[in-house]
Image (spheres, rainbow, N blue to C red):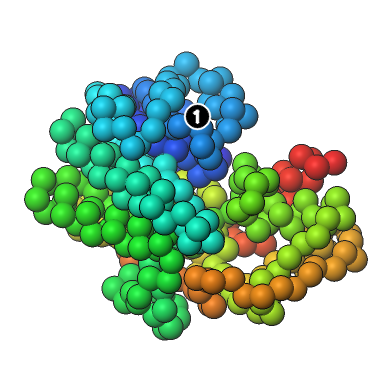
Amino acid sequence: MDNFFHTKDLTTADFLITGGAGFIGSHIAEYLLKNGARKVRVLDNMANGFDSNLSILRQYPAFEFIEGDIRNADICQQACMGINYISHQAALGSVPRSIKEPVYFNEVNVGGFMNMLKAAADNKVEQFVYASSSSVYGDEPTLPKVESRVGNCLSPYAATKKTNELYAQVFARTYGLKIMGFRYFNIFGPRQDPDGAYAAVIPLFVKGIMKQLPVYINGDGEQTRDFTFVDNAVQVNVKGMLTDNAAALDQVYNVAVGENFSVNYLFNACRDYLDSTFEATYREPRAGDIRNSLADISLAKNLLGYEPVKNFKDGLTETIEFFKKLYS
C-alpha cells in the first residue's frame, strides 16, 4: 500500500487507531506508519486483535500500543491525549453473535463509542472518523443503497451502529466535534480472522476448500454482497481524517465498490482459484441477514475524493493468496 491516499505531510501528525490490532485497524495503522506519521497509537483490548498484526506495526519506531478496553472511560481519555486524528475501529462485529449477546454488544459498541466521543471532545481532537456498517439499512429494499434511506434494523448489531450514527450527529452539533462515519460493505482482505465461531466468509471458504472441511452457505447462496477490499477502507479512513472539506463533516458514507456478487459466485471463484472440485453444504438462511446489498458510493466520491483502488476480483486474488500461504 503506497502513498495513494493523502497529500498532507504526516510527520507532524499524531493518530489514534482504536481496534488497531484487528483486521481493518491494523491496515490503517500500517499505512500511516509507512507514510511517516509522527505517532500512531493503537488502543486494543485484544478481544478481536492479533499479536501477529502488532508485530507488523512494531517494526516502526512511531508506533505506540495501549492495551485497554473502550468500555473504560479513563483508558479512552489516556489514549486521546495529544492526538490530532482518531480512526475508531474498535467494535464487536457479527450479526448472529449480536442476537445471542445483545447486552454485550451494546456495552462495547454504544458505551465504548460514547467514551471515545467524550474523550475526543475533551482532548480537542481535530477530526474523528468511525466505522459504521451497511447493516443499518436493515429492511430498506431499494438498491443501490443511498445514505439518506435506511430501514428498520434487523439485529442488535445493526441497532448499535445506527445508535453510533445518532450520537455522532449529537457530538458534531452539540460539542463541535469534527466527525464522520463509514458504512462498510463486506470488507475483506488479508488478516481477516480465519478462525472462531464467527469467522469471515472468505477465509472460511479458503480454509474449508484447502483442508476439505465442511463449508456452509446460508440459504440458496444467491444473496448478493458488495464485497469491498480492505485497501478501500484504508483509503476512506485516511481521506476522512485529513480532509479540509467542511461539507464532508457530520456525514455518514457508504464504503464499497458499487458492484455486487452472489455468495455462490464467491465460493465458486475461491474453488476455481484453488483448482478444487470441493462442494459446499447449504443450510437454513441466517436470522438478521440482508438479502441483497449494493452501495451507491457517489457521496464519498464527491465529498472525500474516494475512488476504489481495487475491485472485488483483484482483491479476492490477493486475499486467497494470503490465506493459501497460511493453510499450506
> Residue 246 placed where, x, y %?
18, 53
- The extreme top residue here reads 61
Judged from the image, the secondary structure of the residue bearing numbered disc 1 is helix
> Residue 171 placed where, x, y %?
16, 49
> Residue 285 placed where, x, y %?
62, 75
Of residue 318 and residue 111, the one placed in the foreground of this image is 111
| 85 left or right of 217 in image | left
Residue 106 appears anywhere in the view: yes
Residue holding disc 1: 34
**Which residue lies at the image location 85% right of the left edge and 41% below the top edge?**
328
Residue 239 appears anywhere in the view: no
- Image quarter where the N terminus lies is top right
**Which residue lies at the image location 27% right of the left edge and 39% below the top edge?**
116
**Which residue lies at the image location 89% right of the left edge and 60% below the top edge?**
275
Of residue 209 and residue 24, the one placed in the foreground of this image is 209
Residue 165 position by quadrant: bottom left
Of residue 244 and residue 113, the one placed in the foreground of this image is 113
Q: Which amino acid does label 1 sit on?
A: Lys
Residue 167 position by quadrant: bottom left
Say above or below: 106 vs 290: above
Dot 1: within a 10 Å radius of its alpha carbon, few (fewer than 14), some, or many (20 or more) residues?
some
| 244 left or right of 90 in image | left
| 140 left or right of 287 in image | left
> Residue 230 placed where, x, y %?
54, 50
- The extreme bottom residue here reads 142
